[in-house]
Image (tube, coloured by chain):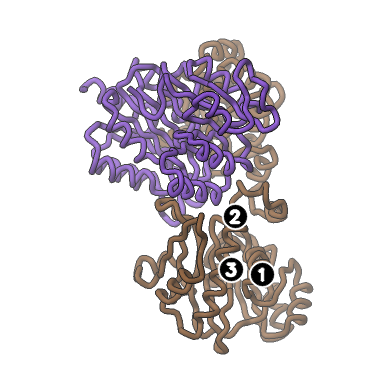
Amino acid sequence: MSIFVDENTKVVYQGLTGGQGSFYGKLNRDYGTKVVAGTSPKKAGTDVDGIPVFANVGDAVAATGATASCIFIPAPGVKDAVIEAAEAGIEFVVCITEGVPAHDEAWFFNKLRRDFPKTRLLGPNCPGVISPGKANIGITAGHIAQAGGPVGIVSRSGTLTYQALYELQQKGIGVTTCVGIGGDPVPGTSFIDCLRAFEDDPETKAVMMIGEIGGSAEEEAAAFIKSSMSKPVSSYIAGVTAPPGKKMGHAGAIVSGGKGTAAAKMEALRDAGVEVGLNPTEAGELMAGIVAKL
Amino acid sequence: MDLFEYQGKQLFARYGIPVSDGAPVTTVSEAVEVADRIGYPVVVKAQVQVGGRGKAGGIKLAADADEARTHAENILGMDIKGHVVKVLWIETASDIAEEYYASFTLDRAAKLHLGMLSAQGGVEIEQVADEDPDAIAKIHVDPVDGLTEQQCREWVAAAKLNPSATEGAVDILMKLYQAYVDGDADLVEINPLILTPDGRVHALDAKVTLDDNSLFRHPDYTDYDATQVRDAREEFAHDQGLQYVGLDGSVGVIANGAGLAMSTVDIVNQVGGSPANFLDIGGGANADVMAGALSVIVSDTNVRSIFINIFGGITKGEEVANGIVQALERVQIDPPIVIRLDGTNADEGRKILEPHLSDKLQMQPTMLDAARTAVELAGGNRK
């Protein structure tokens, strides 16, 4: 099994006719993802390499039965795109777009929480989700992921997500699902959402969690692991040596007022029984040790 | 993007928040001119984006033109914790009966906006939070509903301000929330928010951080961008569209992706070296981007070696390798380079790099090996 998406998930790509949308839409379809539709208000009725394009998500859902969407729309249009998907009944919205204003993210997070509780948002500013061998929604390179489990991966950083997949592949360890939650201040899906789903997934036997400086998401995850997880977890936190007050690329990655340091996060995770590596390779080795003992 | 006090006050004024009459100046004669116009006594305030400027002598009261001139002369050009004062804000002096604190920011854990109000203003709010957390009245605001006046009144009551400040505080806080939301701010903070002896409530300072991601709907914010304080390296990188943070070490770092770049900085430190920078070149790694990144790195004279750490995802190893080879033909690089190339088609990429390898261009199989080599080439461990 896998979490969030599998080989039966039908996906509509919002912004399929754009450069990024068509590139990754086709790549994801070639991987095996059921890419059933795209949307573009001006190009309805056309197709992208055989994928039919509709005027909006509602039309696409009515015609294809899509239950998931993937957003490649530029930042100014993301707020409307998320709500459009939710109103059309989409249950899982993956937003790849980066550069979305924090106030928009806070607004649609709360709008979904209140009015569309059945819709889960992943992102914005995330690499997406891959259940290796089943479905790949987003920009992860499919061939660096080994199918079959027993490890689930959740990560706040794109390239470190790939690095984690690759470390495990090098060791011959498979992955049930790898979720990139993104590095923005208000991610639609949190570490805890993913940890809970992995805990409930019978095929996932252990979880690798990649965090970074800023905010308190890793500390909250640590508390959840301590109280509610039976499965072993290995972790790595990027930004151990980041200077305070400097934003390290991600909108969320900043140590301010002495809060959000890697040291505090690693301490909280260790306290929850998590095996913490000092770099991605070490976290991979720790996971290999965990898997060997399963 | 952090605003200077004068920019914050100008932004507040747009939303009707009462601030003192004043103007920003860059010369002594302008300072006196403004002071003469707005009337004495005036306050001469250093415009730097760092705390503790009052203690450093960067804020002075002037009773007349002579004093205004003296203070302006002293403060312009002053170095406050490494920030050189280039702009002064001259404003009419205020009589202060009480000092409060007010702010709005995003509570990332609750995923709601957070307002903080305290009757203990004028000092660091972290200090108040540590010593007397009950002295801060907090309110969570759902972004979908916004702040209602009823909520705001209850919040002000909870903060136990002087009753004569209630109406003024409610009015300012409603406007401050508007400025926070409509202005796409990460933070708006007034410290101190003052009550004057004649019962007016008034913003005596302004601290504003704007969300860089919101520039598309605030074209006027590009004016603020022009006054941002960056060191020469950061300015150069910004012009190239690169995510760069200057550090003070000797190993130049180039990586693709923010997480990997942070991780690279970490690993250089872990093996005993000191990184010169954080530099994220993003997903692609074509010759233009790589050449730009290398020029930024070598503009830093402290750099003794360069560590290029690329993980090919969608971008294939051979594209990355070709980008590096072409960039090296275009940019003159003196410090030795260590490359770690992994991920998609890494073998193909390494084959392309192989004929170009030398003492000045080395390749290592893992992040750890590459970091060790780069640190060694930079002159070994600092410890």
What residue is rendered at 55% in x and 18% in y? A27
Mark 3 and mark 1 lie on one chain; the one further toward the N terminus is 1
What residue is rendered at 68% in x and 20% in y? B326
Residue B175: mark:
3
Mark 1 and mark 2 lie on one chain; the one further toward the N terminus is 1
Q: Is residue B265 visible?
A: no
Residue type of the residue flagged with mark 2: Asp
SS for dot 1: helix
SS for dot 2: loop
The residue lying toward the viewer, choosing from B175 and A212, is B175
The Cα–Cα distance between marks 1 and 2, rounded to whole angstroms, is 16 Å
Dot 3 alpha-carbon crowd within 10 angstroms: few under 14, some 14 to 19, many 20 or more: some
- The relative height of residue A107 versus residue B73 in the rendered view (above or below) is above
Q: Is residue B287 visible?
A: yes
User: Where is residue B177 drawn, in percent x and y?
Assistant: 55, 64
Circles 3 and 1 on the same chain: yes
Return the residue found at the far front.
A62
Give the letter of the chain under mark 1. B
Res. A167 image quadrant:
top left
What residue is rendered at 55% in x and 25% in y? A63
Question: In this structure image, what is the colour of chain B?
Answer: brown
Return the residue found at the far bottom.
B198
